[in-house]
Amino acid sequence: MKNAARIGIGMGLMVCGLVAFGAPPVESFVKDVRVVAGPGSPGSVVGLGEGVEAVVVGEVGGGAVSPVCVAAEWGKGRVVAFGHSGYLDAGVLDVGETGVLMERLVGWASGGKKKAAVLDGGLAAWLEKQGYEVVRPGKIDGESLRGVGVVLLGGRELSEAQREELAGWIRGGGGLIAAQTGWGWQQIAARGGPSPDMRTNSLNRMLLGAGIGWTDEIVEKTKGEGFDATRRGAGPMTLPGALDALMKAEGSEKKATGREERRALAQASATASRGVRLLPKDDRTVRPKLRAMMAQHAGEMAPTEGAPLKAERALPRMLMALQVDEMNGLSADEVRAHPASKAFPGEVASGAERVTRRVEVDTSVPRWHSTGLYAPAGGVVTVTVDGDEVEGLGVRIGCHTDELWHLAEWKRVPEISRSWSLKKGANRVASAFGGLVYVEVSGRARGVRKVTIAGAVESPRFVLGKTTKEEWARLRRAPGAWGEIETPSVIVSVPASALRGIEDPTEIATLWQEILDHAADLRGIPRKRRSPERYVPDVQISAGYMHSGYPIMTHMDVVKDLSDAATLRAGSWGLFHELGHNHQDGMWTFDGTVEVTCNLWSLYLMEKVAGKPIGTGHGAVDSRDERTRRMVKYMAGGADFSAWKRDPFLALEMYIQMREAFGWEPFTKVFVEMDALPGGQRPRTDLDRHDEWMTRMSRATGRNLGPFFEKWGVPTSPGARASVSGLPGWMPEGLN
């Protein structure tokens, strides 16, 4: 493997023609800066060139970090890139030393010129206080930027001409402060269809040449609600440095054994796996060398649950990132089954009959439409839409959409689901991993569309109220590796092996529909949903034991909970908890209650479905004595609200007490009331949310809950408490 080290020689000097410039003075930027704001969920920014310096970093898993802010010289100019558009809002400047950092970055980027052009964001007034002349040019050209030292730019779409104009101005000596949320751009650009390649992002099109790129990944905060500005990576923070480190380590006789060596390699792997997915598709400098490495390491690039690919195998992990990127660029006829697909999601018997099916798609129902078909790994599937109108329609292969790039070990290939926008005529698609076939609908589609799908195999699919016993007797033996149980409100995807032993899925499907109806009742929304919820188990998911979203993701050990009526009827706190997350609203889910208000659905469904006593269904709340001890300890400690926010089951006790006294009706009443609030009346701060929840629950119950909230230490304003003081008082028994 010593060839690996030789392949990497010189790679640190140039990647894709990116020439290294002088490094920005990062130490002077962050001197005495301890905490930097983290607005929203910031994304990752990567350095593709050696001259790019990480200014602020966040965690990305496995002990590694990735920049949320970088700086680089570009020609005679200077660029600063932030991983969230919120960094251009004045509100973040008061968090920690963010204002100090921004002042230094703007000063450096401007090259000393005291004229700033604000194209986006709300920093104009702040810049004027810093002594800058602020202009808001209506267009991007040399005349508009005459005399300007620095441009502040968000994630707007720039034309090719605008990108060339601005890039030329920067290289000639201008400065740029750019801020956008990469993953957010991708979601918006997808508009319900396939996720676009991050290389097509407007700022990436312009700044990849400067060695700067935004990824589609989120970074985790490292200091409260922000970032520890003193933290640095344990290894290389740019792609060329990371590639050299990985290849030299692979070619060395001495393997990394010490803690610091392992941390450095994990960092190099994290940096490289993000960077290689932004390499230009036509790159002729790095890709050919790495392809040779892929061939050498092919046997290590098929992770399974029993033999995961761990962080210490840094080089194969980076090569897998490039492999996935390259597979995504292949034509359908070039795709071959990936060796890892046999272990997960599973393989289809080679002799399984390929079928052609014509499906009707009601485009008033957005997101995924199940077809009852399964694409074998590496098999070509042809999708044709009747007529010329295809806007808003796509096809997806695979329900396992969680991406695992940030995790310390991979029990499967980190990205195995793919989607494509449909074009007129025949669309030939293929996945190296295979999976259930879906027609995807975004908001742009209209009417009922007829779609023909050929080349897939049948999978077990039971649709409540439609699939007959006779049909199911045949379908449950269909060759697809995964199948589904479907109701109007929820669709559950499980391995076909879990369905083949079920003689009649009517009972489990009916129970699932009952669960979703109850969930809608508590939320105060119609039982008929715009689109069904989805549950999907996976051998590994992106976060936690389960997580909410579309689909709700779980691990494989809950397949029986999902597909067996008796097991589900006994109650599944976790499945109900994640469903609760999908029903939450930020108006009544204030700081500290994200993992609390979702459990209202756990409690409600445990009562309605499993017949559990009020306030039970989880080991942390089943014992009233334990609940009382937890509460008494909290009260004896002074009812510290920060402690309340850190303990979800302690906080849940407050909600249980209201449910025990007043039932569920007041909760639903308040949910409905707050849904109806006009935008200008919606609570904006956490104190506003406390006030709204307290006052509306007081009126819904007909009792003054102000003292109750005070007893629990949940802050409310004097005005809010005064507004309900005329109602009869109430305090649950034992709280005094």
Image (cartoon, helix red, strand yellow):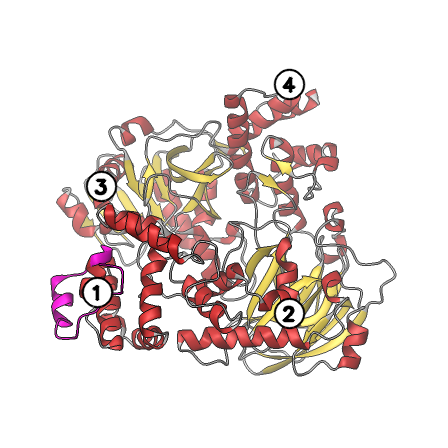
* SS class, disc 4: loop
Which amino acid is tagged 4?
Ser
Which amino acid is tagged 2?
Ala
**Residue 702, image x, y percentages:** 22, 77
Is residue 272 something one can see in this rendering? Answer: yes
Is residue 390 something one can see in this rendering? Answer: no
**Which residue has dot 2 on it?**
565
User: Does the magenta run of residues contain 724?
Assistant: yes
Tell me which corner region of the image, top left, top right, bottom left or bottom right, holds residue 523. Answer: bottom left
Q: Which residues are magenta?
A: 711-736
**Which residue has dot 4 on it?**
252
Q: Nearer the viewer, mark 3 or mark 2?
A: 2
Residue 691: which disc? 1
Residue 99: which disc? 3
**Residue displayed at 27% across by 64% down:** 733
Sequence order check, earlier mark of 3 and 4: 3
Sequence order check, earlier mark of 2 and 1: 2
* SS class, disc 2: helix
Sequence order check, earlier mark of 4 and 2: 4
Main SS of the magenta part reads loop
* SS class, disc 3: helix
Gap between marks 4 and 1 measured at Cα: 63 Å
Sequence order check, earlier mark of 4 and 1: 4
